[in-house]
Image (cartoon, helix red, strand yellow):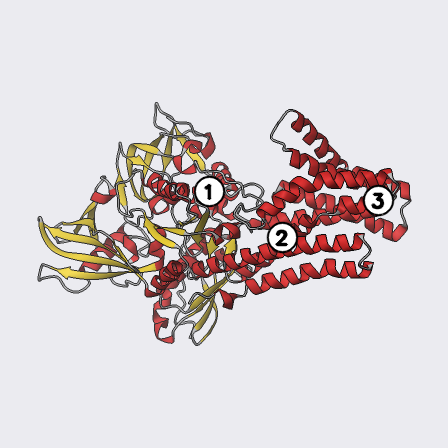
Amino acid sequence: MAASLQDTDAPWVIRSEIDGRLRIFHPGLSNSLGLRRHCGSVLHRTHWLISHRINVVSSTVVIRFPLGNREHLITVLNRCFVDPFSDTSLETALTQENQLADIVKSQSFHHAVRNGALCASVLAVDALLVVPPLALATSAIVLNLPLLRHFLRSIWQWLFRDAVTTQHLLHSSVEVALSTTLISGGLARESLLDGLLDSSKEAFQSISQSTGGRSKEFVDFIGRLKNAVLISPVDRGSLEPCASKLSLGEVEPGMLYGITIGQHVFLHSRLVKGELLVVNALLDGSSLPLRLVVGDEIHFGAYVLQGEAICEALQSFSDAPVLSIEETIWSETSLSSPTAPLENLYRSLAPPLQLGFGMWSLFNGLTERAISFLAFNPLKESEKCKLSSAETALVDMALNQVHIADARVLSSLSAVDNVLLSINALQQLGSFECREQFIDGSLADDDLIQILYSIALSIKADPATVFWGVLTDVEMTPLPVQSLEINAGELSKASYVVKFEHQTAITIRFYKEESVVDSGSLASQNIVEFSRSEAVIGRLLIDWRLSDRFSELFNQLRSLSVNVEVVGDDLRASGSKEPLLRCSRVKQLKRNGATVAYLGDVIDDIPAMSCADVAIGLSNDDTGFVSKTVCDVILGGDPMWLSRLIVLSRRYESATNINSASIMALTCATSLAGFVAALTPAQSIALFNLVPIIAELNTLFALNSSASRVK
């Protein structure tokens, strides 16, 4: 049964097959991120498939399909296993993307792991060999030197008013006083244990929170791209290639370089020699191939389908407008949180009181009481609970194929009242349907489709990725193309002239009707007009309509008091101010006090995504791999999770606020009761440990997926 489906020349192999289920092996699935993304995107767009799952370890993909559609699988599989990134330098930059590697390489993670390992090592040696008190105290002093150095630096910066607040200085003073009291009081083990626990917290915090800001992944990707992509420079006098290549970051404005088939362009340039056939899917989502000739500009992200050319760089890579994004550092405490005033009040009043009572206790010889005063920190316990809750939330979301870059994004997501949808991302949530309209009576069914299909094959393009994807399921014999001319004008005025053997030349023009956006209904129409000798012979009406399922998503968002708005134009003049227009709409809403989430897809969306409160992307999208590097949230195979995610984040934020307030109140009450001897030590310990357990259960209940369903 499998043999009848397998193509002997195909690079993929069927490993197993049962009714309605195939397991296919391809060696590139394990080592090519570009191929995996392309494969997942093609399978996701194939509406009649039931499900698919890619296993990176075994380099296989499992596909479940209706039995009646089995004969169409070979076409789908052949399109799945075409690596769109034949540009090997770009593939190198992509394959280095690894969230775990980014965490391990981060300075905060290194520092936390190193300090934690040293503290744990000393405690382990002491448990086995009984380290002398002097050696143990010396080890504790050495391991606390970074804390002392940080304290001295804070004093210096505070004296010269260098962005260090009195509040921060007092907090550092309490930490130094506690460590000094523990070590001088013969409690070096306790000091080391406190250091181990703090280091463990910092290590986990590095996983759930990004200290480098929201744009760190984007900056890292651009850095890899700048070094991985090699440019072939051309001598300006002879127009001959130079012997050595330059990295993308080394190219300066005015330099000449060569570009050929199968490469992406990452420099805003002008053609000075040759012709190119390009598609700008990465930049603006366009699936319409365009011809560029001498004097035309070629934009960031264009992919060369055909031709060779010499280009002049108009800008350096670092000066590209799409790389100029706004940097945002997540705040530790949400200003809109009900507990924020209480936490700020505590940070202002507690450190002076702790230092005062601690020093008074030491002066009177009450070392244990001094340690109790200095170690008293209900806010620290509250932060530990928040961290634990954040880890629980991230794991829960990951199980539902929702990737969240930073746990603090949940606070922003809970406050979202406006969702902006890029027109390019929106097209991922609907489908295109094609209708033929005949004017010339000699035309038969599928004749116009066959013309477009023949053009796509003649330029060696994947039929599923050009002309709005309407050729995805087409299987027919192409017509032999004798000549093909593609205009070098703007995208909104594109036209083709194609001549087949023994036929008169046919001119093809492209138009777009205005999009219809009303209550719950989103639709648009692209028109492909065919004419012969100035007489129109027929039209292809390519209708895009939002699926009913996603119309329900928009209704759910509106029921949550979230406004939904579509931004962008998917068929416009190249080089327009589209990115600035999308970004300005986000800024306008934020100036009016709105909290904005932006669902983006293409490079044109990056400026808007970077200045939105929450940037959202879709995982099953192989043209949005650059824009996804600025995303705070990446939705998996089911974008319907967007509304549920807002509900979950609101429930999570509410639970976290309740947990924080409860922990602070009960910790203060328990400490006061212990101070006046109203509780035994066993009762105090039980109460201290009971509250975090209750808080964690409250968080788990808030993240219950069944409770997040929107009616």
Q: Which tag, 2 or 3, sits closer to the chain's start?
A: 3
- The reply to whether callout 2 and callout 3 are in contact (CB within 8 Å) is no
Residue 78 visible here: no
For marks 2 and 1, give the one nearer the viewer.
2
For marks 3 and 1, give the one nearer the viewer.
3
Mark 1 crowdedness (10 Å alpha carbons): few <14, some 14-19, many ≥20:
some
Residue 294: horizontal and vertical position, in percent? 26, 33
Residue 546: horizontal and vertical position, in percent? 31, 60
Q: Which tag, 2 or 1, sits closer to the chain's start?
A: 1
Residue 196: horizontal and vertical position, in percent? 75, 48
Mark carried by residue 488: none
- The reply to whether callout 2 and callout 1 are in contact (CB within 8 Å) is no
Identify which residue, 528 or 177, lies in the foreground: 177
Residue 271: horizontal and vertical position, in percent? 30, 33
Q: Secondary structure at mark 3?
A: helix
Quarter of the image with the C terminus in it: bottom left
The span from disc 3 to disc 1 (Cα, nearest Å) is: 53 Å
Disc 2 residue type? Leu
Quarter of the image with the N terminus in it: bottom left
Q: Which tag, 3 or 1, sits closer to the chain's start?
A: 1
Q: Which residue is mark 1?
A: 89
Q: Which residue is mark 3?
A: 188
Disc 3 residue type? Ala
Q: Secondary structure at mark 1?
A: helix
When asked about the image quadrant of residue 703, the answer is bottom right
Mark 3 crowdedness (10 Å alpha carbons): few <14, some 14-19, many ≥20:
many
Which residue lies at the image location 81% right of the left edge and 53% below the top edge?
676
Q: Which residue is mark 2?
A: 387
Q: Secondary structure at mark 2?
A: helix
Identify which residue, 670 or 180, lies in the foreground: 670
The span from disc 2 to disc 1 (Cα, nearest Å) is: 39 Å
